[in-house]
Amino acid sequence: MREEEKKQTSRKSTFRRIIKKRWALPAIYIASAAIILTAALFVQNGFDDSANPAKESETGKNFKDPAVEVNSELENIKMPAADSEATVIKKQFYDVNGTKEEQEAALVSYNNRYEPNKGIDIAMEDGKTFDVVASLSGVVKNVKEDALLGNEITIEHDNGVVTHYQSVKDVAVAVGDKVEQGQALAKAGQSLLNEEAGLHVHFEIRKDNVALNPIDLIDKQLSSIEAVNEQTDNTGTENENAADPDKAAEEDGAQSGDKAKDDDAANSSDNKAKEEKSDQQSDKPADEEKGTESDTNADQPEDSGMQDEKNSDMQNNYQQPAQN
């Protein structure tokens, strides 16, 4: 009994000695606060997980959808052919800043009508058909058959960018399909608009419905289209008139016609004013002449009266000497 009492007494004395230390109480407070804080965080995390049991599964389920959009902005624009190194350009894009020879070579002739080429016509060196692939990831917006252009596939991308694939056959996609870059869309075919190209694909890139030169954008990111589109907008109406000579000629003719009409109207007004002035001048001498004649006629009676009076006086003077 005495030994147990001694042990308990020694334990109490040890605890009291520790409590009396300066660092004892702050250490106890810090340790207690850490334990309480850890317990509170653990309880809170457990409550959030129990309240949202499907959070992890939903995140994993929808992860692929936005990934396509983000990656499409980082993709480099590719040629729409599986083996791009074996391709040739049958007809280039009509560049309004190009030389006269380059512009003539980029005109498309059909039914005695010339149109500027809004894209590039791609074919294989051996003239055989090939797989037409998506130049960028996107969503198929339109698939249609066209007797003149051949079958056409339209794919929409980010930031108002749209790619067109014409003169294709054996189409493998439908409207609403999400396609990845390099995915096969169809086979190269023919079109009545450019029969000389043979088996080919007509490829266009448009930004806000403005046709851009695909050659300038190959192997560049989608963001580079913004800078190219700004340069195209700066040229404005001048580029449109250069690309469409008939339209420019019509506008020039209309302006010339309007100017000629204005000139005719001005000349007509001047001639009318001159005629009115001439009539006024011709009326003025007539009035003056008429006034002079009236004055003359008014004076004539006075002259005749005076003449009669003189004749009467002469007659009286002649008679008086005769009587004498």
Image (cartoon, rainbow, N blue to C red):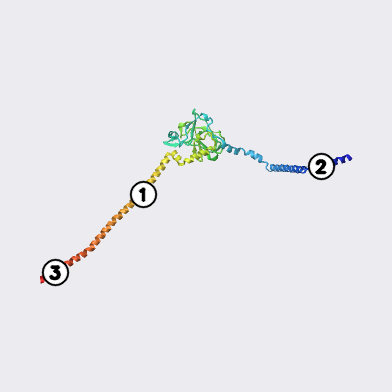
Left/right placement of residue 8 relative to residue 81 reads right
The amino acid pointed to by label 3 is: Asn
Disc 2/disc 1 C-alpha distance (Å): 119 Å
Left/right placement of residue 102 relative to residue 16 reads left
Q: In which quarter of the image is the C terminus?
A: bottom left
Q: Residue 125 or 287: which is nearer the viewer?
A: 287
Residue linked to disc 3: 317
Q: Can you give x and y, in whole percent of width and height, for residue 61 in the image?
A: 63, 38
Disc 1, SS? helix
Q: Nearer the viewer, mark 3 or mark 2?
A: 2
Residue linked to disc 1: 266
Residue linked to disc 2: 17
Q: Can you give x and y, in whole percent of width and height, for residue 282 in the image?
A: 28, 55
Q: In which quarter of the image is the N terminus?
A: top right
At x 21%, y 65%, the residue is 302
Disc 3/disc 1 C-alpha distance (Å): 78 Å
